[in-house]
Amino acid sequence: MGFSEYAAAREYLGIIGNPVITYILVLSLFLGFLSILYLWKKKDKYYDILIKCLYIVTGLYLLGFIFLVWFHIQIYNTILIQYPAFLAQMIPVGESRMVIPMWIESEKLYFWAMASMVFALTVRKRKELMAFLGIILTVFSTIVYFFSNPFKEPLPIVNSEITQWFSTLSSGDASIFQVAGTLYGRITYYYNSTYMWIHPPMLFVAYASLVITAVACVYMLRKHEKVYDDIAYRYAKIGYILLTTGMLIGYPWAIEAWKDSAWWWDPKISGSIMMWVLYSAYLHTRIYASKGKMWSVTAYLGIICFASLVFTYLLTYIVPGIHSVVQP
Amino acid sequence: MKLKNYDYYLIILTALILFAIGLVCVYGITYYNYLAVNPQWTNTIQYSRYIEDMNSYLFPFLVLLLLALGLCIPKRLLEQDFLVKFTALSLGATLLLTFLSGIEKGLVFLLATMIIVQSFVLIKTIKRSNALRFEKEGYAGRLGSSLLHLGLVILIFNFMTLQASSFHLLIFWAGMIMITVGNIFSFYPEWINSLLK
């Protein structure tokens, strides 16, 4: 097992994964069409097909996720980073394997979309809400397909790190010290970190739950029915618990991985605090939602909270910082 | 003012303070982006100034938030007129300390006060004291609310004063567990109550 087997597995993932994500896109577009049709005509036959479609799309997302898990296992099995003896003073271990989580790079939006699909199935009895959610999920799947397709070019950063490692190792280039140092840091404090298996998935599952809250808040404003407040609150509770604990778990990880690096008040951290305080405000105002104008204040706040969530997610791509992929 | 109206205005005040903290964060993101034009800026004195500036913008709102929490929590123990006096006294002492030694010292004093008060509330809650008055009914909801508020205050105190301590992470985990358990107990009191029976 080695680099060539890894490269073959990566290519094979594209072969088996691309049809799945294409079907996801096509069926999601159909789901969106059915959602609009149901909201317009209010006929149950459209809704029945919509729900069947949602089940199939969710199933396809899960199938694609299984393919990704398989690929990650292949990375673990095929890639063994063996540090040359002359690096022993710099690298405290002789070799490393890569335990890559399923929520990095282009896979994280896929994971969020998949979790949102699963949560959407839990509100399938609320027809109008579900149909509106169907439109949101269609947009989500379209964004995943065109901007964050995990099968088009699987894990590009991980791939470039692996490729660079083996090419530097074989060429005997002096840059091996820098390449090895960076790779060891990435493997130890990022990919293989236990926190990586807790902090991001908790946040993405929270985000998925909070999608339902946002949609229910839109319906609170439209319909002025208490049931939508109940739904918004039910999913906000799940989201808030995961958001709070998930965010806090990032703190000891930051201390361990970034040490004296400039991470405090980094844009992503500021964004996360902003999102958390807004959701805290939403949960506070909700207590008195039935009093005066608090009903609409709560609903608007729920929507603002979700806008802040999307903004916080996008910060990684639009503002430089220690969490970001963009450079100044 | 009736207790119900008092709670309502307290919640409005808390929401406004939280919203203001959100605005401080938006300012931080914008300013960070502006400073990052120079890729090396975090290695310069500008970064420590940025951290100091951001903390100085946050601290007044944190003081207000703690006072709001302080108004919220001791109402479970104390009469309303006494509570107003207690808060005024806390605010006065905090302002005096801020004036003499800076807002950080004032905030630490307030945090220490809140830890004492809320630990007292938690002990009373665990003992199922009748002296406590809660919005939430049921043992789990009350316990959750107490744990949540105490955990939050402990975490902020830990961030502010014990970062260099060897107990920093231990206290962090304790605070985090209190917040998580507090959230679960507060949000799902019926389920927890049924488990506790």
Image (cartoon, rainbow, N blue to C red):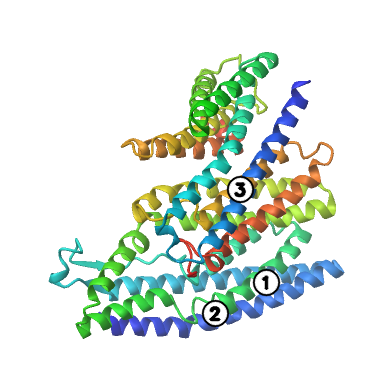
Q: Residue furthest left?
A: A85
Which label number is shown at residue A20? 2
First in sequence, mark 2 or 1: give its number.
2
Residue linked to disc 1: A139
Does residue A9 appear in this view? yes
Pointer 2 and pointer 3 on the same chain:
no
Q: What amino acid type should be assigned to the residue bearing mark 3?
A: Val
Q: Give the spatial CA distance, label 2 vs label 1.
A: 17 Å
Residue linked to disc 3: B24
Query: Which residue is at the front of the view, A136 or A172?
Result: A172
Q: Residues within 10 Å of mark 2 (few under 14, many from 20)?
A: some
Instruction: Give the image location of residue B129, x and y in percent.
Output: 56, 15
Q: Give the spatial CA distance, label 1 vs label 3.
A: 31 Å
SS at circle 2: helix
**Closer mark to the observer between disc 1 and disc 3:** 3
Query: Which residue is at the front of the view, A308 or B186?
Result: A308
Q: Residues within 10 Å of mark 1 (few under 14, many from 20)?
A: some
Instruction: Give the image location of residue A267, x and y in percent.
Output: 53, 57
Q: Give the spatial CA distance, label 2 vs label 3.
A: 43 Å
Q: Is A128 on the left-hand or right-hand side of B163? A: right
